[in-house]
Structure formats: C-alpha cells, structure tokens
Image (spheres, coloured by chain):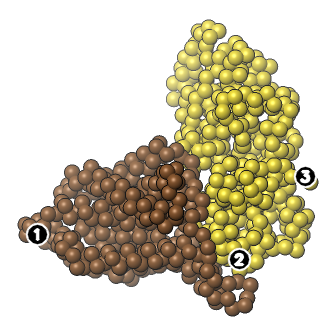
Chain colours: A brown, B yellow
Amino acid sequence: MEYFLQQLINGLALGSIYGLVAIGYTMVYGIIGMINFAHGDIFMVGAFIALIAFLILVAIGITAIPLALFLVLLIAMLLTALYGWAVERIAYRPLRGSFRLAPLISAIGMSIVLQNYVQLAQGARVKTLQPLITGVHTLFDFGNRLVVQISNIQILIILTTFALMTGFSWLVASTSLGRDMRACEQDLKMAALLGVDTNRTISLTFLLGAALASVAGIMYLLYYGVIDFHIGFVAGVKAFTAAVLGGIGSLPGAMLGGLLIGLIETYWSAYFSVQYKDVAAFSILIIVLIFMPTGILGKPEVEKV
Amino acid sequence: MKSARLVGLAAAAVLATGTTANAQITVGVAGPMPGQYASFGEQLRNGATLALEDINAAGGVLKQQLKLVVGDDACDPKQARATADRLTGQRVPVVFGHFCSSSSIPASEAYAEGNVLQITPASTNPTFTERKLWNVFRTCGRDDQQGALAGKYLADNFKGKKIAVLDDKSTSGAGLANETKKALNALGVTEALRESYTQGDKDFTALVSRMKAADIDIVFVGGYHTESGLILRQMRDQGMKTLLMAGDALADKQFAAITGQHAGGVLMTFGSDPRNRPAAAEVVKKFKAKGIDPEGYTLYTYAAMQIWAQAVAKANTTDPKKVAETIRAGKWDTVLGEISYDAKGDITVTDYVMYQWKADGTYAEMKM
C-alpha cells in the first residue's frame, strides 16, 4: 500500500510535467490543425532561460528563494513566449494555406534549428542546478520500513500544474480571447469573416503555449536539476503522445493524457520492468486509439465541406 | 569498380611519393564531439591534439608532419559507421577512437575493409577485440576485467547485503553490468534486483522507490555519469542512504556537478589514474600549462598516438597492415608506462583499481 501510494506521487509529478507540455500541442492543433513539433524544444529553451535567469539572479545577489523563483518564472515565461511567437511568425505563418504537410516539415526544421542553436550557444554538456527547494513530508507512516513521502518540489509541481490548468480552462471558456480561440478552432475562415483577428489569435495561442511550456521547463529544472539541449525531444514525444491519448484538441484531455502517461510509466516501472516502460506507455496509446480513435476526451472530427 | 579503386590508389600513391619532406600525414580522431557525451569526445580530441603537437615538434613521423582530422559520431552506431566511411575515404592510415563501444564496433568493420588501423582509447566492451579483426587495438582495459574487479569487490565487502545491478542497455553499460553480475554470481552472491533503464532518461523516481522498497544497500550502475548522477540524486531526495558504485564511465567531473555533495562515498572502478604515473608527469604538466586537466581518457588517447608513431617509425611505413603487425610484436613506451599487446589487440596488463569519490567532487584511488 505504501509502495502503491509512493509510486502514485512519483507518477503524478512526472505526469504533471508531461501534461503542461501537452497543452501546447493540443492548443495549436485545436486552432490550426497542425502538430507543432518544435514545442518540445520550446520547453527546452524555457528550461535553459530559467537556468540562466537563476544564475544571473544569484550573481546580482537575489538569493531569497521565493523572490528568485517568482522573478525566474516571470523572465522565463516572457522570453520563452517570445520564442513561441517568433517560431510561429517565421516558420508557420508564411505556410498557412499551403498544403497540409508544409508546416509540419517546417516544424521539424524549427525543432532542429532550436536544438542546434542551444547546443552551439550553451554547449553540449549537461547543465546542472543544485536543489533549491528541499524538504520532504511524510504523508503516511504505517510503522513499516517504507513511509510514504512527498517532497516540497513534488507538491509545487502538482499544485502549479493544476492551478495553471484551471486558469487556462477559465481563459478559454470565459474570456473574449478564449471565444476568439474557439471560433478559430471551429472555422478559421468564417471567424475571420466575422471580424475575429485570426492572426492575432493564433499568435497569442503560440505565446500562451510557449509560456506554459516554460513553466514546465522550470519545474523540470527544479525537479531533476539536469538539463541539456536534447531534453525537448523526449519530453516532446511523450507530451505529444499524452495529447493524442487524451484527445488532441481537448485541454482537459491533454492534462488527463499527461497524467496517464506519467502514471503508466511509473507503475510499469514499479511492478514490472523499468526497461519496458516506454513500450508499456506506447502500447496503451495504441490500444486506446484502436477503440477510441480520437483519444479519451477527443471530439470526433466533423468533415468540413 | 575495382579498376576505379586501383586508379584511386595509384593517384594516392603518386601524391604520396610526389611530395617532399614537409608533406603531411593526416590521421583521424573520432568520438562524440557534440551531444551529451561530448565531454568525452573533448578528452579524446585534447589528448590527440597535444600528442600530435609533441610528435610534430620532435620532427614528425617518417619526416612528415601529422595533421588531425576530427570525426564526430555522436555516440550513435549509424553515424559512427558513416564517420568511419568518411575517414576511410580520406585515406587516413589510423583513427584514434571511437569513444562509445557501440560506435567503435561498427566503425571497426568499415576501417578493416578500408585498410585503416583503429586504436580506441576508451571502448572497453570485450567484443571490440574479440572478432579477430586485424586492425583493432585499445589502450584501455576491458569490461570483463573491470566487471571481475567490481564483482569481487561487491562480493568481498557486501556479502549478505542487498545488491542491485542496473544498466543503461548500451553496449558498454550492459556489458559491464553483465560481467559484474557474472563475477558476483561466480563468488556465490546473488543480486537482489537486476534492471535496465534507457539512456537519456531523467526520471528514475519509480526505480528509486522500488529499490527503497527492496531495501537495497548498494547499487551497481553500468552506465554513464548523467544517469548515474540522477539516480544518486533521486535516491538522496527520497532519503535513501544506499551506496552507488559504477564503472569507468563515471570518470567525469560533471558527475559531481550533478550530484553536489552527494558524490561523497561513491565507488568507481577505473584504470589506476594515469595522471599519477611517473611516465606521465611531463605531459600532464604540458596539459596543465594549456589550462586542460588531462582527466579520463585524455592520456589514453595521447598514448594511443605515441604507440602508433613509434610503430610507424619502426616499420618505416604507414601501411596499416604492417604497422598493426609491428604494434603486436613490440613493446611501447607511453605516458601510461610500457604497453605491449596480445594477439587480439588488448593490452597485456590489467590496470583497473577501485576509486572513491569525495564530497568536494574529486576522486582518489582506494587503499585496498
């Protein structure tokens, strides 16, 4: 029982990070129907910006952790959002209205560009950050050898993710920007004819997605303490899988998918073999897609005529 | 095709003979230059570069200056093969590398076909020299020697304790873990957990919780420093005091950067530090003067080039086949001390010893 609960906590923390990245995939897909393969690398850029910001703050003497964390969050979200915007402006907008595969290829190209850019600018070696948020709480102690523990950083990750998720759902459901986004999702051309500034809406979607990815990047940096230019690839693939599993285009779906992937990986590692955790995660994806082709919470696509 | 190749050879021969004393011999060094193992590639390149400068300063090889061409394999078997083909195409007589065993092995076949000698300073997987290829040598030891030491140490010091053996599924990591397990089992000790993870994984919390539940006392990792460091860090995060032990792939200062003060007490099998050998003193000083710490495989690469240069001088030709025969037959004076080879291309002495990391991020040989 303790073991099960401990692994649940491990899985939730991992899944939350996947979920945050997955939101970016799902939003872009929802609005312009393309897979933004560079999103995983935006996440990586976010983690790097956060690390650099931490180092600068320490250098200028701001070491109070809550303040430093808040400033880093602000700086990283802002700068990463700019990257997200620039990627859309450079690589996707000129190709909108082109054939379906063009932006996809351009996205893969952008992903390679970002990876190589960070590798050249920051070097290929892994970058490390010593643990800033320490401390663990014992949740349950049944008097056995194994006690169920949750660390402060795990609490932070899970809470941040749920807070952002709630805030974001509210934004999409109840603000004018959210209404514009939903209008673009339904029919881009019609939305434009009815006075929605589609270019602005799409740009803002990329900005928001990148900002969320940067939060995931910060969490990743704080949790694991090790980043390199390649982390975006694996995280991107996992998050994309999460988005598809949850139903691509659906916000709660992305979150659910992220948590599921995290939990499947963790429980498979816990009870079967660590070696095959990715096999397990992807097998479940395949099984779900066979029975629910649009994912768990996805809406069946309406053929537009 | 064959005639085209002959023409090529003839052209190369004309070029070679038509040049004067200031002609150059291009030699290759190959390893993961970018990528997450780039720090090892850097060690190889540093070692080769300084050896080259020293040899050139002493008049070169066969009165010709040496030039270095760097091949990048990103530790990827496919790219290693492509890099090997490219270096072969440039008609280098010898390549110093590669780093990862999983790269050295496929590359060695391309070199054997293309008439190129290969001396790896770092690939420790036994398979590398076990395939009866004419062109392979190494200046480092083999995983089975390393695994035997690791297994014996575990059996001697942790008998009756719970031991976990992990690997990263890479040729060298899994090879080392298997050899360690073999040695351990032969001494009558059975491990409590045997698992593999994937290179590049960052989240080991599930695995760590599992080891915690199994009450593991010491974990042996066949894998590189990034993952080993994360495993250690996440064990300490979960409040575990479990010891970590690993192979030579840990020999990178970055391990301590990842783990912080937790590095203290970590055990490692590695060649007895070449930096401390008397034969290396002068070269180490030269490296330090350039601001390079010749850690890890730097000096092994330096020694590889020394062996080749001496063998070429003795054979009076750069013809790879003749040089290979010469290397097998002779004794070579290197920064690592005197080296001689068996028929397979392995060094004839074992030089693995146990090391322990200290909390300040350095490591030192253990008194045994």
Query: Where does label 1 land, which residue?
Result: A190
Q: Is residue B111 visible?
A: no
The relative height of residue B255 versus residue A218 in the rendered view (above or below) is above
Residue B345 in the image: x percent, y percent?
Answer: 79, 38
Q: Mark 2 and mark 3: span between their CA atoms?
A: 30 Å
For disc 2, the chain is B
Q: Is residue B165 visible?
A: yes
Query: Where does label 3 land, which residue?
Result: B367
The relative height of residue A213 versus residue A249 in the rendered view (above or below) is above
Q: Residues within 10 Å of mark 3 (few under 14, many from 20)?
A: few
Residue A75 in the image: x percent, y percent?
Answer: 39, 57
Which tag, 2 or 3, sits closer to the chain's start?
2
Q: Residues within 10 Å of mark 2 (few under 14, many from 20)?
A: many
Image point (91%, 64%), residue name: B156
State the residue in front, A218 or B126: A218
Query: Where does label 2 land, which residue?
Result: B212
The residue type indicated by label 1 comes to Met
Q: Mark 1 and mark 2: span between their CA atoms?
A: 58 Å
Q: Which mark is residue A73?
A: none
Closer to us: mark 1 or mark 2?
Answer: 2
